[in-house]
Amino acid sequence: MVGMLVAGADPLEAVRLQVVVLYMLLGSVSIAAIVVGLLSYRSFLTARHQLRHLPRGG
Amino acid sequence: MVNEGLTPGAVGTAAEATLGVLLALGVVPATARYLVPLGGMVVGNSMNAASLTMASVRDDVAAQRSKVEAALALGATGRQAVSPVLKTALRRALIPLIDSTKTTGITFCRGPWSACSSPARTR
């Protein structure tokens, strides 16, 4: 947004784009985090729903 | 411990969903001039959040092990037992992004004059 303002774009247009970018990032980061969370918990559980022994550290 | 191969799938899903909606609604013209920076921002921040989520899940499951095992002992399925830990992990993974939204509208210059960038960092 700062680049657009420095380049002489209309401030309202720059703000519109910034708001679009903001919501886009919020949505995409949330979706990515949810997908990773829902797919990754299985590696801590065995097939019989038991918690594996997790090594410390790493 | 956690499968690192999950990141491309998650980032791809997130990028498809958000950029697909933007293109379908016609908010952004489908030119390289818009898609390259927007795609870069989406992929960069999503990868960041995916790594933070996996690290938080791993650390929280190890730290709250007794809570998860108590839920499992009381008859919860694996997913039900892990879900409170997942919630805290997700909340923690979203902290950097939500923190960057606090400075929206305020020009946030960290480097020299020519390197000023908005809080949504373009990579």
Image (cartoon, coloured by chain):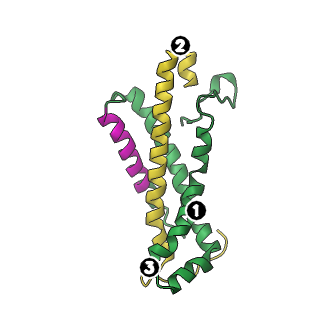
Chain colours: A yellow, B green
**Quadrant of image for the C terminus of chain B:** top right
Could you tell me residue A33's position as x and y percent?
49, 55
Category of crowding for the residue at label 2, using alpha-carbon neighbours closer than 10 angstroms: few (below 14), some (14–19), many (at least 20): few
Q: Chain of mark 2?
A: A
Could you tell me residue B88's position as x and y percent?
58, 62
**Separation of disc 1 and disc 2 at Cα?**
43 Å
Q: Chain of mark 1?
A: B
**Separation of disc 1 and disc 3 at Cα?**
19 Å
Tell me the SS state at disc 1.
helix
Tell me the SS state at disc 2.
loop
CB atoms of marks 2 and 3 within 8 Å: no
Res A52 visible: no
Residue A33 to residue B113: above or below:
below
Residue visible at 67% across and 28% down? Answer: B109
Q: Which mark is residue B88?
A: 1
Category of crowding for the residue at label 1, using alpha-carbon neighbours closer than 10 angstroms: few (below 14), some (14–19), many (at least 20): some
The amino acid type of the residue labelled 3 equals: Thr
The amino acid type of the residue labelled 2 equals: Gly
Residue A53 to residue B49: above or below:
below
Residue A46 to residue A10: above or below:
below
Q: Which mark is residue B77?
A: 3
**Quadrant of image for the N terminus of chain B:** bottom right
Whether residue B16 appears in magenta in the rendering, the answer is yes
Residue B29: name its quadrant. Answer: top left
Could you tell me residue A14's position as x and y percent?
50, 22
What's the magenta region?
Answer: B9-25
Residue visible at 36% across and 46% down? Answer: B17
Residue visible at 56% across and 65% down? Answer: B57
Could you tell me residue B2's position as x and y percent?
52, 67
Depth check, front residue: A12 or B116:
A12
